[in-house]
Each structure stands twice: as structure tokens, then as C-alpha cells.
Amino acid sequence: VVTLAEKLIFVVIDGLGDRRCRSLFGKTPLEAATKPFLDFFAKNGKVGLVDVVDPSIPPTSESGIFSLLGYDVLKIKIARGPLEALGIGIQPSDELIFRSDFATIRDGIIVDRRAGRIKEGVKELEKEINEKIFLDDVNFIFKSTIAHRGIVIFYSDKFELSEYVSDTDPGATGVPPKLCKPLIIGENEVRTAKAVNEFIRKSHLILNFHKVNLARKAKGLLEANYLLLRGAGIGLPKVRKLPEIYKKFWNCISGSPLEKGISRLVGMNVVDVPEATGDIDTDLKGKAKALFDFFEDYDCFFIHIKGADEAGHDGNCELKKEIIEKIDGEFFSEIFSNVNLRKTIICVTADHATPCELMKHSNDPVPILICGGKIKKDEIDNFSERSCMKGSLGRLKGSSILELLMRELGK
Amino acid sequence: VVTLAEKLIFVVIDGLGDRRCRSLFGKTPLEAATKPFLDFFAKNGKVGLVDVVDPSIPPTSESGIFSLLGYDVLKIKIARGPLEALGIGIQPSDELIFRSDFATIRDGIIVDRRAGRIKEGVKELEKEINEKIFLDDVNFIFKSTIAHRGIVIFYSDKFELSEYVSDTDPGATGVPPKLCKPLIIGENEVRTAKAVNEFIRKSHLILNFHKVNLARKAKGLLEANYLLLRGAGIGLPKVRKLPEIYKKFWNCISGSPLEKGISRLVGMNVVDVPEATGDIDTDLKGKAKALFDFFEDYDCFFIHIKGADEAGHDGNCELKKEIIEKIDGEFFSEIFSNVNLRKTIICVTADHATPCELMKHSNDPVPILICGGKIKKDEIDNFSERSCMKGSLGRLKGSSILELLMRELGK
């Protein structure tokens, strides 16, 4: 009798993939990192490379995750605002929801799109915006989520808000923020864009002179005096849910609103972990604890770990290496100690590469390892972009991974 | 300067209200219980009685909770299936979802609607049902949630499922289960009911001869050999969300799928607490810990505590008294020790009474206490059905409570 593995632990390390770094003597952060546990899993399983969305397309966080969960991202309407709202527990229905970022703007020019990755004081800024701003035609609520990140929810009894309005985030510094504009010609689109611009203008006034920002300026920190908006959407895309496709039940462990939202949309339960900030200082031991606290209750676990991506965006190779070492030492060590590999499939990969030299997402393929259950080992004994090139998994398409993993669980 | 309270802890004790019990020498379980912390809060605040939905209507769990959260339950389409699905992390879209209960049926007659409150072995039964049943026209997935409770999700690419089909749970023992029937005349309704009945018939066959049930029989336990279905629905009702109404952010701490689902629907985040089983043995300390783990991140906390309701349904006055004592000693003691009452409003009430003498929900009003912040005390120094009759809050309507509490937070 062949006993199949019963559980799957699917770990996505945000922005893990990278390129050779000069400051790491020509190694990638993953190669340079001391990561005995990841190497153990690679050595006892198979490795390969993944084109997460398509070899020619740098994945966004959202398209990367949807693809890794088996969905064809070209067929799903993905708006980041409603997904992040769902991630923090707000069910989108008829509201227009944007993802927002606190940014620093001086003389009309964006100096930093993340306001120095502000953490302290964001709740005070949130409170002031919610209490002091009144818009002519619509209601809104602003919710800061993690650090500079947040969402803005617009709703109205006076007219039907439209999602066909543009981002205000130009995606670059050194330029002015954009105005929100109608993407199609229509009265609702014009009124919606007008309301969004009114919100941005009024919030800028309040933020610019808020004591939190005056204090930041005095300390030489970048002030959070502007809200950049993007990813507007109303409602959620309809997708067939993972439990309906594979008859397995999933639990997501992530601190990040977007990944939590996508996980909820595809039918996973989501566990909130205290101090899983979804950021560089995220509590990795807390994530491992949550995994084992709920291990009996679900078949599959989707674990999303941030940190490496942020270091890549900041172009900091050494930090990225250190974060990978921290993830190995605090998270994968716990998997190593507590998981019966005969009964559990482990898969580790990334949603995209964030090469430090580019400081943004790239279309480079990302490494993947799978081990456990009946999976045979190949000859590769460590986990890196280069070693995975020679792995027996070859080059996979992101959206095919889940089917492959499910087969190991007997689907 | 008047400083308003900043936080709200809103605790709903499921089925708390009761009537005089002979075995408690004419006291109610709440009166008979030793509960120093609840009495402390009552003594230092105001008390009263609540008609949760209406003086003439015994609330269901769902109508009670919606009402306590300020909604007019007569205006919301409430189907329990989709709400419980949402509670366990499945976003209802186009699926037909039922709430299910493992029951015991012998010679075609329902002997127990909860299969002796079965706990052990439900995951094995779930697995067998999901793996061994194939229906002609539709797909399904069955998920056991807590103890005898579960949901069944039907979906189909062949025809449009209809929610206008009847429950199979007659709500009583000593009678046969009902067939699922179309509630309106239409092809989709007929096909839907046919598929549901096919599922029930096939699952009964599998359950009746499953080794988990043979073992239960051998031990003299009630076998879980039938699934009673109720609360069918497709999709979720649209409601204005609490954060949009009051500009406050909410966190729900509950182990119970229905309450988690309702909380998600109204815009709360929901924290999963390990071992918060939503049942008599629920981990109350875990709930208190979750409250304080996330205390800084939210303005308002909705905490739902089960146990008292189950004892009421089972007609067990002594157990109900003991459970109230446990809730006081393990949960409210932590609130007492860790909360700054000057800055925090506390409200404790129930979603309905479950009098032990009736063994079901009643339309009796339920006790309520509020304290903290600027709330003055009245002359009542303990918390019970009778003492609350004389409280200064008088007799409140369930749906008016939240507005009253929000005013204390400066809304």
C-alpha cells in the first residue's frame, strides 16, 4: 500500500529571487546566505526554476500570487484595493477601494513613495484624516494597514461610484503625483475622480501640518504628507475556490493584506498572527507557531514571508542576505524540527525576483524546491538561483505548480 | 477637556439569559453563579434588559447577533449557510451553501439532531464523504467545522443552482428528516432539490457503515449517520459596514463559524484563536490573550463566548451555572486585570435567552451591563436577569445598543 503525503506546506518568500551582487562578491543574496535548513530541504528533494507568470512579464505581487495558486492571471480582473480590503477583513461590495501609500512630497514633487517606510504615528494620521475630512459628494474611510500602506474606501448614496478612474501614484520619484482621471467618459467617472482628488487635496493639507510630521521633519525623517492611490476597484473577481477544485482545505499564514485578501478570495482560511507585520521585522517564530497550532485542522498551508522583497526594493544586498538567513534560522528550522517529511510535502519558492540592482520586480525566473512524501531527490544539494537551474524540475510555469503539488497529495 | 473612551469591548455570551431553575433553588444560572468580575462591572456601571430582536420574537443566533450589531434583521436576507462558510474563510459567490449537522437516525426517525455532540472522528467522516460521493449533476464539498456542525457547498457548471429549496432539518427529534423540496416552481429548483436529496441519501449510506460510527455504536455512543441541512443560500446580503457607519475599526474574537461570518460581513477583522472551539470547552484564556495581543490595532472588539447556550439547549442548569463561573473566572478576570476602565467601554449582554426549562431560544429579554469611560454607575450591584430589571438602562431594543455604545466613544 502506497501511503500518500497528507499535508502541504507551501512557502512563498516575497521577492526572493535576485542577481549577482557586487557587494556579495558576485553571489546572489540567496547564494551568499548561510541557510542550512533550506539547503537540507533542497538536498532531500527536487529543485528547479519557475517563470511565475510568463518569461517576459515581471510579476506584480498580486499576479505572482494568483499564478502560484494556479490561476490564469490574464483571465482575472485584479484590482489591488478590494483585495487588500478583504485582507484586513472588509468584505468589498459596492465601495470603491484604493490601495494607498503614505508618501513624501516637497514642492509638488514626490521625494519618497513610502515616506521613509514610516511606522510610528500612522494611527494618529489615520485618525485625523477620518475625523477631519468631509467630502462633498461621497463618504470615505481611510485605514492604515502596515507601515506606509493603507486603503481608502469611498462610498456614496448620491451617485454610483465608478472603478474606471486612474491611479495617482506615478510609480516613480522626482515627478509630481498624478491627478485621478476618468478612464472612460461618463458622469459617474467624472464625479468619482473629482471626489478622489478632493480627498487627496484635503488629506495633503491635514497631513502636511500634522504634529506627527512636524516631529518627523524635526528629527530629519521623511514626512508622510501625501497619499498616493492606486489599484482602484469595486467588488471582487469571481474565481473557482481551491477547496472546490482540489477538495483540500487551506490555511493562510501571512501578515500582508494583499496576500491575505487573495487567500481569502480563493477559499483559504487566514490566521492573524500577532506581530506578523508583513515587513522586515516580521515575527517568523510566530508564523511557525501558527502553522503548528492549526496543523491538524487543515490539509494545506500557504505561508507568505515578506522582508526579502523590501530589501530588494531598497537595493540592499547585505540586508537581503541577512533576512534570508533569519527566515532560515527562525522559520525553516522550526519546519525541520517539527514536520514529518514522510507525511508532508514542502514547497518553497518566490512570487517574483526583486533584484537589488534593479530595485524593482523583474521577469527573472525564481528558484523552487519541493520535498517530502514520495518525492525523490535529485542531485542538487543547495537552494539558489544557479543551483536550481540544474535541478530535475527543469523550468516550470508558475500556474502549474499547485497541480503538481496536489498530485503528491493524491489528487 | 473631556477625554472620551478610546476602546470598546463588546462581549456577547451566547444564550446567557434564563429563568428560575428548580435545581438551583429557584435562581437563574446567572443568579446562582459566583461571578465576582461580572458583578464588579455591573456595580461600576449601568445595567438593564434588552429585547434583542423584538419582545415577541425568540431570536435565532443569526438574528440576535445582527440585531446586537445594530442591523434591522427584518430588512436583511439572512441565510445561515453562506454566513458560516464566510466564517471559516470561504467567500460565498455562486455556490449554494447549507449549514449541516451530523445527526443520529434510526429506522428513519431522528434520534438526536447533534449525534451526541460528536467531536472525535468528524474529520474522517468528512474525508470519506468528500472522496466517495459523486453526484450526477453537481459538485459539492463538505466541511465539518466544530463538533457536529458543518457546511455543504454545492456548485455546478451544468445548471444554475437555486437557493429556493427547503431545509431537511425538521428541528425536532422523533420525526423523520424532511426531503429537500423546491420552494418555487422552476427547473433549477427541481434539479437543485434532487441533487441535495441525492447527496443526503449517498452520505447516509457512507456514514451508516463507516468505522467511526461502528466504533461509536459499540461504545454505546450515538452514531453520526445522517446530515441534516438547513439555511440554504447563495451569496451574501449587502449591508453597510460598521467601519463605514461609525469610522471605528473592529476585531472579532470568536470560535464559532456563524459569528465569525457575520463579523466579516459587517466589516470586522476576525482573529482565529487556537482551541477557541466555540463550544463548552472553549479556551477562554486564549480569547483574552487574543484581545490583548491585538488591543492596540483596533478600536472595538466583538467577543462571542459560547457554552452557556449549549447547556441551555441540553437543559442543564448546573452546567450552565458552572460555565458562567468559568467565563467569569477565566475571561472577565483578565479584562478586570488588564483593562484601563477610564479609557475603555465594556458591554456584556446575550444574543438571546436559552432557558434550561425550554431547552431552546426564547423571547425573554436578556441582561446587559455597560461600564467604563464616562459612564456613571447606577444602584445595581450585581448582574442577573432580575437585578437588571431595575437598572437605569431600562429596557433597550437590541439594535439600539451599538449606537449607544458608539456615542461613548465620541461618535
Image (spheres, coloured by chain):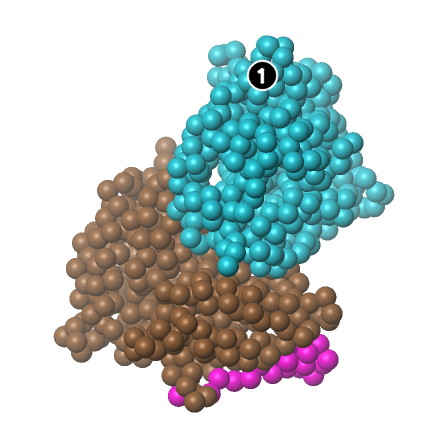
Chain colours: A cyan, B brown
Q: Is residue B65 magenta?
A: no
Instruction: Give the image location of residue B26, x and y in percent.
Output: 17, 75
Query: Quarter holding the C terminus of chain A?
Result: bottom right
Residue most extreme to the left: B25
Q: Is residue A388 left or right of residue B40?
A: right
Name the subunit of mark 1: A
Instruction: Give the image location of residue B404, x and y in percent.
Output: 41, 53
Asked if A283 appears above or below A112 in the picture, the reply is below
Residue B265 figure quarter: bottom right
Q: Residue at x 29, y 49 (%)?
A: B285
Instruction: Give the image location of residue A185, x and y in percent.
Output: 85, 43
Out of B38 and A156, give the one closest to the viewer: B38
Q: Which residues are magenta?
A: B173-194
Asked if B371 appears above or below A127 in the picture, the reply is below
Out of B168 and B157, give the one closest to the viewer: B157
Residue A202 figure quarter: top right
| Residue B148 shows in this picture | yes
Instruction: Give the image location of residue B354, x and y in percent.
Output: 33, 72
Q: Residue at x 35, y 73 (%)?
A: B215
| Residue identified by numbered label 1 | A317
Please identify the dominant SS of the magenta region: loop
Q: Amino acid at mark 1?
A: Cys
Q: Is residue B187 magenta?
A: yes
Out of B38 and A18, give the one closest to the viewer: A18
